[in-house]
Amino acid sequence: MSGTLYLCATPIGNLEDITLRVLRVLREVDLIAAEDTRTSGVLLSHFDIHTPLTSYHKFNEEDKAPELVGRLLSGVNIALITDAGTPAISDPGEHLVRLCIDSGVPVTSLPGPSAVITALTISGLSTRRFAFEGFLPTDRKERMERLAALRNEDRTTVIYEAPHRLKKTLSELADQVGADRSLAMTRELTKKFETVVRGTVADCLLDTEVHEPRGEYVLILGGRPEEEMAREKAAAWESMSVAEHVAMYEGQGLPRKEAMRRAAADRGTSRREIYQALLEE
């Protein structure tokens, strides 16, 4: 029988956040694959865990994954940990999990600390629907496309950012989604100097002028307000003639009656009035 891959969440700051289950599994497995063996070594030493370690990080994950899967298939149980948080969430793990699944190796996740959920729940913004963006692309074109897409995103969005890029990202958000969009800027989560700045993109940008960015940041960007989107759509409808409005829906493959019904709903009028306007045009 093959071994099992255990995805073990580790503390993002406060060591007391590690679960009893993770501690037990880290002691019981045959091998721990760690993003940085030095960082993980400190954690394991703190909890008096002496399981053998091997490195598994973004620079060797594609080459190392087949080796780990081979060991799993031979019956070895392996725990995967990253420097902090849950493996495969903006950290190594996705490639190994996919290879394990393709090879028939059991994979299970041991839940625990996650910067995404921690920041989201203390942001004060809507948690009913949210999207995880992670780190924005470094390629300028792709980055601008991603930022532009956030302009009309109505869900709360979670973004990771490093301190040396924070001001640039906030400035780009101000340009692309608007300086008045709601934003919670969190840092040093679960640590002694945990900080949350709540307000708008402009407020958070101003804060970086007063306090030099330090530590890793999680930005919680509020979704675009529904009323703002409604106003923009209404303005777009008003700029169209009734015939153009109906033709837009017909171009999407809708029959004329349905196109008229939708145009009427958009413009807050009746289908009869749409029909009369079409005759007059």
Image: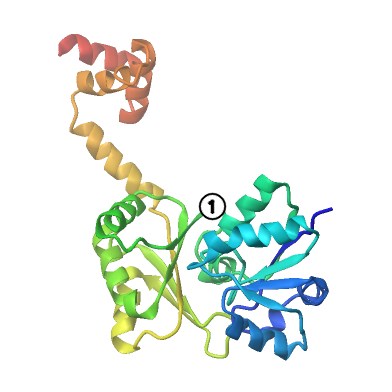
Residue 45 in view in this figure: yes
Counting from the top left corner in percent of width and height, residue 215 is at: 45, 83
Q: Vertical placement of 13 versus 168: above or below?
A: below
Count the labels in the image. Answer: 1
> Residue 25 falls in which quadrant of the image?
bottom right
Residue 179 in view in this figure: no
> Residue 14 falls in which quadrant of the image?
bottom right
Amino acid tagged 1: Arg
Q: Vertical placement of 237 versus 175: above or below?
A: above
Q: Vertical placement of 12 versus 99: above or below?
A: below
Counting from the top left corner in percent of width and height, residue 46 is at: 71, 90
Identified at 26% across, 58% down, the residue is: 176
Counting from the top left corner in percent of width and height, residue 20 is at: 80, 76
Identified at 15% across, 14% down, the residue is: 281
Secondary structure under tag 1 reads: loop
Q: Residue furthest left?
A: 281
Identified at 30% across, 64% down, the residue is: 173
Q: Residue furthest top?
A: 279
Residue on which the image places disc 1? 129
Q: Is residue 111 left or right of residue 21?
A: left
